[in-house]
Amino acid sequence: MRVLLFNGSPHKNGCTYTALNEIAKTLKEEGIDAEIYQIGIKSLTPCRACSACAKLGRCVITDDGVNDFVEYAKNFDGFIFGSPVHYGSACGGITAFLDRVFFSALLSGRMDYFRHKPASAISSARRSGTTATLDQLNKYFTISEMPIISGRYWNMVHGHTAEEVRQDLEGMQNMRILARNMAWHLKCQEAGKNAGVPMPKEEEIVYTNFIR
């Protein structure tokens, strides 16, 4: 079993990475492979809402790694997306990236890369904006039939530097609790699959417009 940890911060080894790395270490202790995916400082174009992905089978924008990530995602059983707080919400890079990841996956018929796979969001901040960031990121999961994994507190760490984050003992402890909960959920899914528990029945999607 494999979990992909997505670092949405432009800082490769900063606060968000420090939290994700604590999760990765704990997952590996639980027998779960973990890999950190760095979004880095590449230029990211926001979604154009052109719906071309429905015809192309991929996002029409091809030079910033979104299409590669969607294909890569099918190799993983669970996801944890981390973002720093920028102006009280998730940073612009992860927002542009995930808008296109999930929209193009939906319209191109690749939602099975994400559907029913457990996911979680974590946020890092110097002071505030963490819960708003978590609420924002969790919406990608709830629209995609992805079970949300929690810790014992909201999944956040505080600090202005990586060293300060490591001093947030409660926050770092919660990263470990989150990791163990993710590992437990994945093992339960595997046990259910081995026991012959069927996946949820799918229905044809119905779209209702409010103005006709």
Image: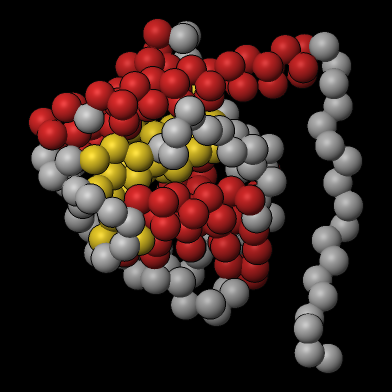
Q: How is the image coloured?
A: secondary structure
The quadrant in which the N terminus is found is top right
Seen at 64% across and 38% down, the residue is: 147
- Point out residue 54 in the picture as x, y percentages from the top left corner: 64, 68
Q: Is residue 70 above or below residue 151?
A: below
- Tell me which corner region of the image, top left, top right, bottom left or bottom right, holds residue 103: bottom right
Number of numbered discs overlaid on the protein picture: 0
Viewer-nearest residue: 44 or 118? 118
What is the quadrant of residue 115 in the picture? top right
Q: Residue furthest bottom?
A: 212
* Whether residue 110 can be seen here: no
Res 159 seen here: yes
Q: Tell me where residue 19 sits by quadrant.
A: top left
When the figure is inspected, residue 37 is found, relative to residue 3, above or below; the finding is below
Give the percent coordinates (x, y) of residue 12: 18, 41
At x 82%, y 11%, the residue is 195
Residue drawn where x is 11% and y is 31% of the image: 163
Residue at the spot 41% in from the left edge and 51% down from the top edge: 131
Q: Position of residue 153 (x, y in %)?
A: 45, 33
Residue 42 image offset from top left, x and y in percent: 23, 58
Q: 39 left or right of 142?
A: left
Q: Is 141 drawn above or below residue 104 in the view shown?
A: above
Image quadrant containing the C terminus: bottom right
